[in-house]
Image (tube, rainbow, N blue to C red):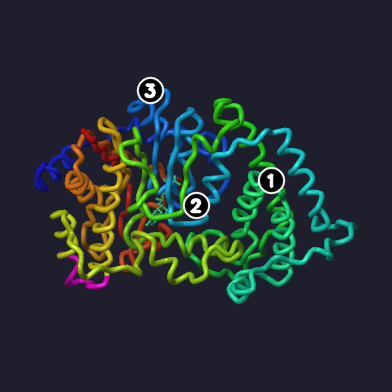
Amino acid sequence: MSPNEILEWFDQTSIDKSWSFIGYKPSDTGKWTHGYHRYPAKFIPQLVERLMDIYITNGTASVNDPFMGCGTTVVSAISRGFQASGTDINKVAHLVTGAKAKAICPDYLAGKVKRFLSQISCFEAGSSLFPVSQVEPHIPEKHLEKINYWFTPAIRDELGKILALILEETDPAVQSFLLVAFSHVLKTCSIWSQGSTKPTRDMKKRPTPPYDAIKRHLLKMQRGNAQFYNVVPPEIKDNLDGYLDIQIGSATTQAVPDNGVDLIVSSSPYVTSYEYADLHQLSTLWLNLADDLKEYKKQFIGTSYKQYDDKLLLSQIASHIVDEMMPKSRKKAKEIEAFFIDMQKVFNESFRILKPGGRCCYVIGNTKLKGVDILNAEAFAESLQYSGFKLDRLIKREIPLKILPQKRDEKTGRFASKDKADSEAYPTEYIIIGLKE
Ligand SMILES: C[S@@+](CC[C@H](N)C(=O)[O-])C[C@H]1O[C@@H](n2cnc3c(N)ncnc32)[C@H](O)[C@@H]1O
């Protein structure tokens, strides 16, 4: 299809209400292990499940997500007994996905969690137990200044001791399970403004004591694990390594062989919206996942830290967006250009790893920035063709309010609270499906 035909195709596609999944409660969208960790702009599992229902016709399929995030695609594939692979540059995403994909025997886990909670129960309010003072708090020295910025000294030390005890756990699956709980509660235990996804301090906030937060969350995770354990096929429970292949790395160069994948279900980052490295910085600091946060951030696609001067943008739709942005902000225009250049590489990689007859499903919304329409979806559709895909299907769906923030700040392009934002963002989004013939 020519760029004009693509634009027309999008114009003529109306919303398919059946893809909005209205009526699903948080207990449905957060079922199994899906509620382990907050993650901005994550999928709902129902969307992935429906795509697998439609496009997977054999029981031994292989499913991939180049931007796996907290692993919605990977977990959904594992629940069906499929091979699952995924990549993310965000080390927190790798930790969370690994823990979510692993169904642990519930009785065994209950024993481990009980033991862990009793080890840290001296932190329970009113406890007369002798504090675990002999445990040296594990606080990464090189991030101490930043940790002190976000945590009171008492909470920092309690978290440090809890982390030290988690690191003593010898079963890697249980250790990851505990680390994910630890990572999840960091926000509520810090003075990071609870209502804000972005790193903002709230000096009036009363952080939740770590023991209370981690106990509550571990019990919730334990229930999720038990549900998941019941649905994962036995052969996967016994041999997860034979089915799961997740990597920390770039979506542009996945460690996945050629022609092996049946279905890709993914949602890319958006240009200049979430800086995932910033959003997960509490976990990155505590778990010591990056030596240099600045360098780490540059590896993310869609970040405002990137621009190219020597690379060609193939998509005419994307080039038009860049040209429109240039007089308004050269910097933003270059960021948008870099984003679409990177995404072209991701689509090339998707084409390489898919089997002939396989499909990629990219979920993406459009937005407006500085008055310029950022037609991500149309540009993606055009780019998919340059990677070799045939455009197979377009689904336009409404996004129920709770899943994505609906507004962007006009000036910065970042997501903002409703009352502050003055530009529509993602009231609808698209699933663009490409076929490798
Ligand atoms: C919209 S989120 C994906 C959420 C995912 N669908 C889920 O359900 O959790 C986009 C992801 O792209 C990741 N990302 C950004 N740049 C990347 C890169 N160069 N390679 C791989 N992943 C990257 C971010 O860390 C983030 O996890």
Taking the spot 64% from the left edge, 73% from the top edge, the residue there is 141
The label on residue 171 is 1
The circle on residue 179 is: none
Q: Nearer the viewer, mark 2 or mark 1?
A: 1
* Circle number at residue 58: 3
Distance from Cα at disc 1 to Cα at disc 3: 34 Å
Q: Is mark 3 within 8 Å of ligand 1?
A: no
Question: Looking at the image, which residue is at 32% across and 41% down?
Answer: 258
Disc 2 residue type? Ala
The residue positioned 48% from the left and 28% from the top of the image is 80
Splitting the image into 4 quarters, where does residue 333 fall? bottom left
Mark 2, ligand 1, within 8 Å: the answer is yes
Farthest residue to the front: give it.
257
Q: Residue furthest bottom?
A: 145
For marks 3 and 2, the one nearer the N-term is: 3
Q: Position of residue 406 (x, y in %)?
A: 37, 52
- In the image, residue 293 sits, relative to residue 5, either above or below, namely below
Q: Residues within 10 Å of mark 3 (few under 14, many from 20)?
A: few
In this view of the protein, which residue sits in the foreground, 93 or 278? 93
Element marked by disc 1:
loop
- Secondary structure, mark 2, is helix
> What kind of residue is marked 3?
Asn
Position of residue 169 relative to residue 290, above or below, is above
User: Which residue occupies the foreground of this view, 111 or 33?
Assistant: 111
Q: CA distance from mark 2 to mark 1?
A: 20 Å
Name the image quarter holding the C terminus.
Answer: top left
